[in-house]
Image (spheres, rainbow, N blue to C red):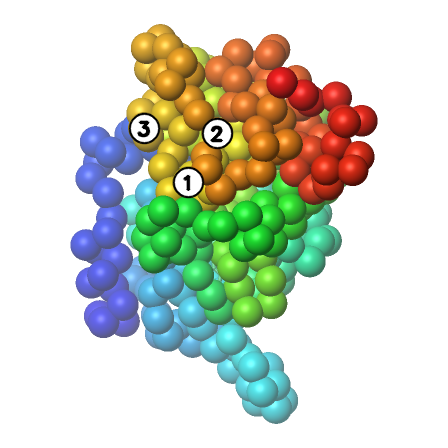
Amino acid sequence: MSEIESPIDDLLISEEQASNLTYFAFAKSHNAEPALAPKKASIGVLPDVLAGRYRLERLLGAGGMGAVYRARDLLHEQFGDPDPYVALKILSEEFAESPDASALLYSEFALTRRLRHDNVVRAHTFEVDTDCQRAFITMEYMRGLTLDKLLCERPLGLPWKELRDIVLPLLDTLAYAHCRGVLHGDLKPSNVMLSEDGLRLFDFGLGQAEEGVLPGLPHLSRERFNAWTPGYAAPELLEGQPLSAGADVYGVACVIYELAGGKPPFRRVASTLARDEHLERELHAPKNLPKHCWPALRKALSFNAAERSITAGQLRDAMSATSSWRQRLRFRA
Ligand SMILES: Nc1ncnc2c1ncn2[C@@H]1O[C@H](COP(=O)(O)OP(=O)(O)O)[C@@H](O)[C@H]1O
Ligand SMILES: [Mg+2]
């Protein structure tokens, strides 16, 4: 595995950075250890083939907690599957020994699997390789471009015709997830892919279920939890409030704003700082955005959660409105 291990070593964050990203502490109520919790003594290096079945081929991306590979499902291949590729998300060696981390990966799997929507990545399985004792997820392998890469290629943003084809399915997907009681928690360009099969929302690694939904999943203790992405995280999240649908709406509004004009709404600084420095005073409608979309998007970008009184579905409706019935919408200047 040396050829794919070295890029990960390069990408792994330092211990100090890792402590900022700590999201492995559970609320006191959670005391059950996962049955297959990896044990420190037997953690091994990543083999070429996981669980006797998935051959790791290429590193697709790596973050604070793990890495995503393209893998070939040898079992499906053996039975003649012409497209036996899957994406495989696995904890990095550093975190593989933590039962909390494995349970979090399971939580990401369970949240994703709860969503059956054309625009949500399809989760296949959650497994543990018993030799190297590492938990992993397999999912649909998406071929395409994440929105952060798209923005690198299109630094001035997208014209409305193109923008609309991204924004409407994205908002539709988020509205659906919220209806199913699933909060994403990390809406940002690198977690949305324009794949060959259409738009896909993925990476529910910071996601959470609404109260009463998937009650068996562990609850994260937010005290030691500081993993939000500052440029897209709503102020209340950075100030320790629990994740909410409103926080997702703030994140998606930042993504839409950036796609429309190529620039983030508040110069990519943390939203708490942007609020304290009154950066909203210099906020203008991006030039590629039709006028009728701005009042709703502006509302979704409110720093104050109470003023951000718009749902993902309402934002979608406002953005899909045509001039003939626009007047009927509530979100006007
Ligand atoms: N199912 C997939 N198919 C193809 N590429 C993927 C898939 N899932 C993730 N990736 C790639 O790996 C990167 C990291 O994946 P992600 O789930 O966002 O992990 P992290 O939690 O580290 O951000 C993504 O930005 C994307 O480029
Ligand atoms: Mg991600």
Amino acid type at image mark 2: Ala
- Residue at image mark 1: 261
Q: Is residue 68 left or right of residue 293?
A: left
Instruction: Answer above or below: position of 238 versus 139.
Output: above
- On the question of residue 96 being in view, the answer is no
Determine the CA span between mark 2 and mark 3: 14 Å
Mark count: 3
Residue 68 is situated, as x and y percent measured from the top left of the image, at: 41, 59
Amino acid type at image mark 1: Gly
- Residue at image mark 3: 267
Amino acid type at image mark 3: Arg
Q: Is residue 228 left or right of residue 27?
A: left
Mark 1 closeness class: few <14, some 14–19, many ≥20 residues within 10 Å = many
As drawn, the label of residue 292 is none
Determine the CA span between mark 1 and mark 2: 9 Å
- Residue at image mark 2: 285
Mark 3 closeness class: few <14, some 14–19, many ≥20 residues within 10 Å = few
- On the question of residue 20 being in view, the answer is yes
Quadrant of res 45: bottom left
Residue 246 is situated, as x and y percent measured from the top left of the image, at: 60, 24
